[in-house]
Amino acid sequence: MYTQAMDTMAKEGKGAPRAVAALSAEDAQRQARFDERIDADGRIEPRDWMPEAYRKTLVRQISQHAHSEIVGMLPEGNWISRAPSLKRKAILLAKVQDEGGHGLYLYSAAETLGTSRAQMLDDLHSGKAKYSSIFNYPTLTWADVGVIGWLVDGAAIMNQVPICRCSYGPYARAMVRVCKEESFHQRQGYEGLMVLMKGTQAQRDMVQDAVNRWWWKCLAMFGPPDADSPNSAQGMRWGIKRFTNDELRQKFVDATVPQARLLGVTLPDPDLKWNEARGHHDYGAIDWSEFWQVVNGHGPCNRERLAARVKAHDDGAWVREAAAAHAAKHTPVEAKAA
Ligand code: BYC
C-alpha cells in the first residue's frame, strides 16, 4: 500500500553542515574519501573507515530500531491467546514472529559496527536506550490488533522504505526484507478491520474507538517536528535518513486519509482537511508534551514493557549458557590454543 508510493525518491540532504573535528592528515584523507562516497550516494560497509560520530549514530538508531521490534511484539502478543478464530490466531502468530525476526536482523546489523548484542540489551534493560513510543500504550480490544497493523505498521513502512537506501550497507539490506514483511502486516491489519466494519454496529464502534486512541500516537511515532529534531540534519547529510520526520509524517497522513474513507472510519482530527495550495492535507496539533513523557519512561505501559523484556532475558539465561557450553565443547583444540 505504501511501498509503491515511495519509488521516486531523489537525493536529499546535500549541503547540510558536516561534523568538523581536528583530524590527522591520514584521517583527513579517509574523511575525504568517506565524504566522496556519501556524496556519490555510495554504500559504506563494515570494514570501511567511517567517522566515529557516523558509527555512533548508526549504533544508536539501529539498536533502538531493534529494541522497538522486540518490544513491539508485546502489545499484539497480548491477543494471541484471545484471537477470535484459528485463522486470525495463525496470522497474528506469524506477524509477531516476524517482528522478532526483524529485531534479530537489526541486532546483527548493529553488531557489524563493533557493539555487542549483550551491550545493546543491557542498554535497553537499564532504560538507557530508547525504543518506539508507540509500544507504551495498551491494546484494549481486538480492533487494536487491526489498527496496529493498519496504522502502526503503515507508519513504520513509511519510515522504513527510505532506509532501504540508507548509506550503511548492512542496515539498508536488512530493511529490504523487513519492509516486505511489514507490507504484509499492514495489509492483514486493514483486511481484519474491513471484516469488522462489515459486521455489527458494536464491531464498527470498536474499530472507531481503536482508531481514536491510536491515530495521534501514530503521528508522533515519526519523531519530533524538524525544528526540534537534533539528529535530523546530520542523519540526512550522511544518507542515513532520506526524509525528515515532518516529511514522512505528511506522506503518512496523505496516504491514510483515503484508506480511512474506504474503511468507513473517521480520523479524530477536526482540523484534518485537504489544502489545495499545498497539495497535502493539513492536520491538527500533536501533543508533544505527551510524546516526551512517554519517551522519557512515563507512558501507560513503559514499566510493564521493560519488565517483560527483562524477565524474558533472565528466563533465557540457561539457553545462552547451554549455547556457550556447546560452542566451547566444539571449538577445535588449535583454535583454543591460538
Ligand atoms: N519513540 O532527532 P530525532 C516498528 C527520539 S518499529 C521514541 O528526530 P532521529 C514496528 C530519538 O531517538 C518502529 N523515541 O532522532 C515494530 C532521539 O533521541 P536520542 C521503530 C523517539 O534518530 C513492531 C530524540 O527523540 N522504527 O515500526 O533523527 C510492530 C530526537 O529525535 C521517537 C525505527 O526505529 C519515538 N517515536 O529520528 C509494528 C526506525 N522519535 O536517540 C511496527 C528507525 C524520536 O538522540 N529510526 N525519538 O536519545 C528512525 O527512523 C529515527 O531514529 C527516528 C528518529 C525517525 C525514529
Image: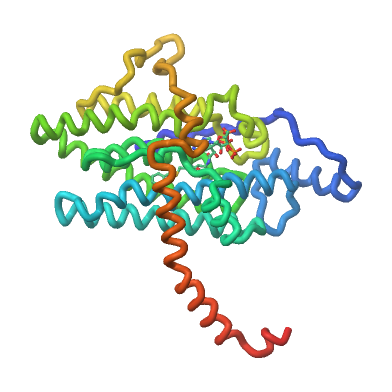
331 relative position to 289: left or right = right
| Picture quadrant where residue 102 is located | bottom left
136 relative position to 95: left or right = right
Q: Residue at x 28, y 56 (%)?
A: 93
Q: Choose between 128 and 230: the one closer to the eye.
A: 128
Q: Residue at x 37, y 41 (%)?
A: 153
Residue 158 visible in image: no
Q: Residue furthest bottom?
A: 333
Q: Residue furthest left?
A: 200
Q: Choose between 298 and 275: the one closer to the eye.
A: 298
Q: Choose between 80 and 275: the one closer to the eye.
A: 80
Q: Residue at x 27, y 43 (%)?
A: 145
Q: Position of residue 137 (x, y in %)?
A: 36, 38
Q: Position of residue 317 (x, y in %)?
A: 48, 69
Residue 8 visible in image: yes
> In the rendered image, which quarter contains the N terminus?
top left
Query: How many numbered marks are there?
Result: 0
83 relative position to 257: left or right = left
186 relative position to 245: left or right = left
| Picture quadrant where residue 197 is located | top left
Q: Is residue 65 above or below residue 280?
A: below
Q: Residue at x 80, y 45 (%)?
A: 31
